[in-house]
Image: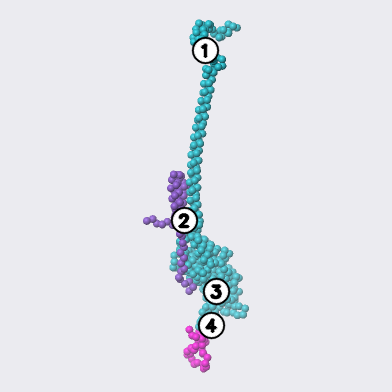
Amino acid sequence: MTEKQTINQKIKSLDEKTSWFYSDDFSLDESAKKYKEAIDLAKEIRTDLEGLKNEVEILSEDFTK
Amino acid sequence: MLPVGSKLPLSETPIPGEAPTFRPSELIAVVNQTLEYAFESVLLVGEVASFKTNQGKWVFFDLKDEESSVPCFMSVYQLKVPLEDGMKIVVRGVPKITKWGKFSFTVQTVQPVGEGSIKKAFELLKRKLADEGLFDESRKRKIPEELDHIGVISSTKAAGYADFIKILNARWGGIKIDVAHTQVQGIDAPEQIIRAIKYFNEHSNVQAIVIVRGGGSADDLACFNDEGLVRAIAASKIPIVTGIGHEVDCSLADLAADLRASTPSNAAELISKDKASYDFYVRNQIDTLERIIDNRADAEIRRIAEQMLQAHKYLKQRIEYIYGTLSQRMKILEAINPEKILSQGYAILSGKISPGSLIEITTKDKIINAEIKEVYDRKANHQSKD
């Protein structure tokens, strides 16, 4: 089972995918496949961002005494 | 506790009469108990006079107004604010009668009030703590970039707290926020905030502590210049961020903190990443990829078009060359065309060139059969004629 990646790890992964497009390995034939991978990852990141919620807990400890 | 006027057992002969009878120590005890019952804790506001310390342990001063003066007493340890005669302060404490029968006010906490006194106390304490190095940049720790658990010290009813949470929720998520509810103004606030700092240091694993409090008057924010609080902030093992008041407000707590934000909202901004900027970054990356693909595709199309153009140009040149060569040859052929020569008046003779021979003469329009009468050299003929 693969461990769930954090948003930052996914961003890093997106950066890596993007860097291929700047590299000498780039080819138009492969670019469509690579572009789809990047788009899917971008959608995943945006979904993750939308789902982020903070959890606020008021401590029961009484600091007035 | 003894009620006022109750009779105490006396070891010696009582004085006759209806009124309660006490010995001095008993009377003082009763009065003190009565005072304690009536004034468990009193806030006293006044101007400091006759300030002095004794043996480096005890502090004595009078707190006075236009009409009266109350002698105050406290330990040096409890004095967290530098005092000077003339400063206006509020003290919390209990009134007492000493065993010598003198009235005294035992002070527990002190806070300056009024802009002048606050400023004076601020400057005095700032100098003292700065000399100790509490505000040195070298002491300040970096706030972790990836925060997923923080402690917040504030009043949950304060507007500053609401601003902080609102901005934090809008910017980022996935953070566990433990909130220690304390007072954030008034004479009791410093102790409560100190307790909260200790709590986080001893009983939690938060990565940073954020102290927030919205704007207010100098009096409202004076608690953040408390020496004990400033020392607790400096001593905290966990990095501390302050977001107190407005941009123009700078407390000693701010100076001791690892990171000072100008407001509670700014504190939320400084400790959190921004969803919107991440979203923008991701969109930008995808846009960039699209541009790269478009550019590369355009470049490829241009390259192929250029190749086709070059091929066309080459073919055209070849055709032109061949056409030129052909034309030239056609001109040559045209030039040596016998019909053309005949049309210029020349004739073609066919047959043996010797006297008596029959020959065929071809002109432009006719073919003539003739007999040769005589043959001689053109030069000889010319010479003979000459």
What residue is shown with label 2?
A46
Mark 2: few, some, or many residues within 10 Å (few <14, many ≥20)? some
The lab-note entry on whether marks 1 and 3 share a chain reads yes
Chain containing the residue with disc 2: A
First to last magenta residue range: B1-30
Residue highlighted by disc 3 = B110
Question: Which residue is drawn at the image coordinates 44% and 52% (left, top)?
Answer: A40
Determine the CA span between mark 2 and mark 4: 70 Å
Q: Chain of mark 4?
A: B
Q: Dot 1, crowdedness within 10 Å: few (<14), some or many (≥20)?
A: few
Q: Is residue B22 magenta?
A: yes
Q: What number is the disc on residue B367? A: 1
Camera-near label (4 vs 1) is: 1
Q: Nearer the viewer, mark 1 or mark 3?
A: 1
Vertical arrangement, residue B290 with respect to residue B87, above or below:
above
Q: Which chain is purple?
A: A
Do we see residue A44 in this rendering?
yes
Query: What separation in Å lies between label 4 and label 3 (alpha carbons)?
Result: 20 Å
Q: Are marks 4 and 3 in contact (CB under 8 Å)?
A: no
Q: Secondary structure at mark 3?
A: strand
